[in-house]
Image (cartoon, grey):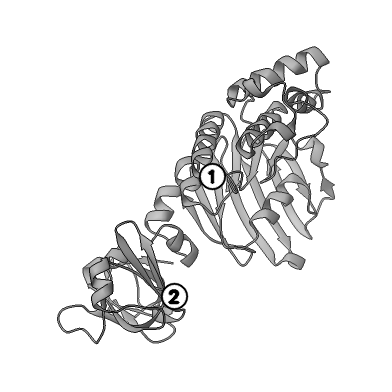
Amino acid sequence: MVAVSGELFVAASVPRRGIDLEFTVPAGAVVALLGANGAGKSTALHVIAGLVRPETALVRLGDRVLTDTAAGVDVPTHARRIALLLQEALLFPHLDVTANVAFAARNARNGGTGRRAARAHALRWLREVGADDLADRRPRQLSGGQAQRVALARALAAEPEVLLLDEPMAGLDVQVATAMRGVLRRVLTGSRSAVLVTHDVLDAVTLADQVVVLADGRVAEAGPTAAVLSAPRSAFAARLAGLNLVAGTIESDGALCTPAGERWHGVAAEPLAAGAAAVAVFTPAAVAVFGEPPKGSPRNVVEARIAELDSHGAAIRVRSAPGAGGLPGIAADVTPDAAADLVLTAGSAVWFAVKAQEVLLHAR
């Protein structure tokens, strides 16, 4: 295993792509980059790998500066000691599996290694990812999951100090993706730093120590995976975690007021001063759905129009159209019987009600 060299620091601006971000990957940690399509995740990886030249940037790995536009430093991609694993394996079709992996070993830093040693090195990494039985096959004889394992072995055979993963489980079926996560968890734990781009919350939960959420090319929030997903400050992280999030400012009575003027009452998870930017977070299970304005105790009532209904385990997930509550959509979980009684369909007008004690208010 390669020794962990130090933290990875990334600060980059690519105006032509709307990117202006800064984040740090601690030594030996796995950081997941989350965000909607076009948020800048892949561009961030390409900046780290040296495939995209930013207008201004500082990329530092331990005590090595890889990119410093102010000082004119731009280390070539092949000399960065960084490996990039994409959605497609991109194996050499004319080489067998062992030769594909050995190619990386022979072209690694410090002059690589000889043919015989490279083959032994390749077989060791194929065993590590559970693909040694594929050693003599050609890429055309591999399934998608098998090809990704081989591509991972090839990336690791170069002994990179940082591994960049751009949605490596995308396109794999559930069973194969689960096995691939297990392989990644085994080869990444404590051995090297990694940056993982993913849309799947399961990838973040099972593989990442920390997450960085990007929105419109900027860092919207960052922190330990469990902390961000249990108390998100951005709409994307909230939806990824299966939570509702309403953004606004705190008023003098402690309620949160959205830009649309809707007020949300909740329990402050931390001290929040009047005028502070904050978010209200609550689960879909905490949302009651009514066909007419509800009577009774709920302090938070929002009129909405249904955009979609989906099965969600034993429940029906009802999501409102954009705009309700200052969100892209509020989600509520109801029983199939309740959905039938209320005659819920796309376009129906409903009222969402949430008790104040079910809403947590966090600083944003």
State whether residue 193 is above or below residue 202. Answer: above
Q: Quadrant of residue 40?
A: bottom right
Residue 246, position as x, y percentages in the image: 40, 73
Q: What residue lies at 28% left-to-right and 81% top-to-bottom?
A: 301
Q: What residue lies at 69% left-to-right and 37% top-to-bottom?
A: 63
Identity, as a three-letter code, of the amino acid under mark 2: Leu
Residue 319, position as x, y percentages in the image: 39, 72
Left or right, 176 with respect to 56, comes to left
Badge 2 crowding class, 10 Å Cα cut-off, few under 14, some 14 to 19, many 20 or more, is: some
Badge 1 crowding class, 10 Å Cα cut-off, few under 14, some 14 to 19, many 20 or more, is: few
Identity, as a three-letter code, of the amino acid under mark 1: Asp
State the SS at label 2.
loop
- For mark 1, what is the residue? 173
State whether residue 213 is above or below residue 155. Answer: below
Q: Are marks 1 and 2 in contact (CB under 8 Å)?
A: no
- For mark 2, what is the residue? 327
Q: CA distance from mark 1 to mark 2?
A: 32 Å
Q: Quadrant of residue 114?
A: top right
Residue 364, position as x, y percentages in the image: 44, 67
Left or right, 143 with respect to 50, comes to left
Q: What residue lies at 83% left-to-right and 41% top-to-bottom?
A: 76
Residue 92 or residue 268, whichever sits in front: 92
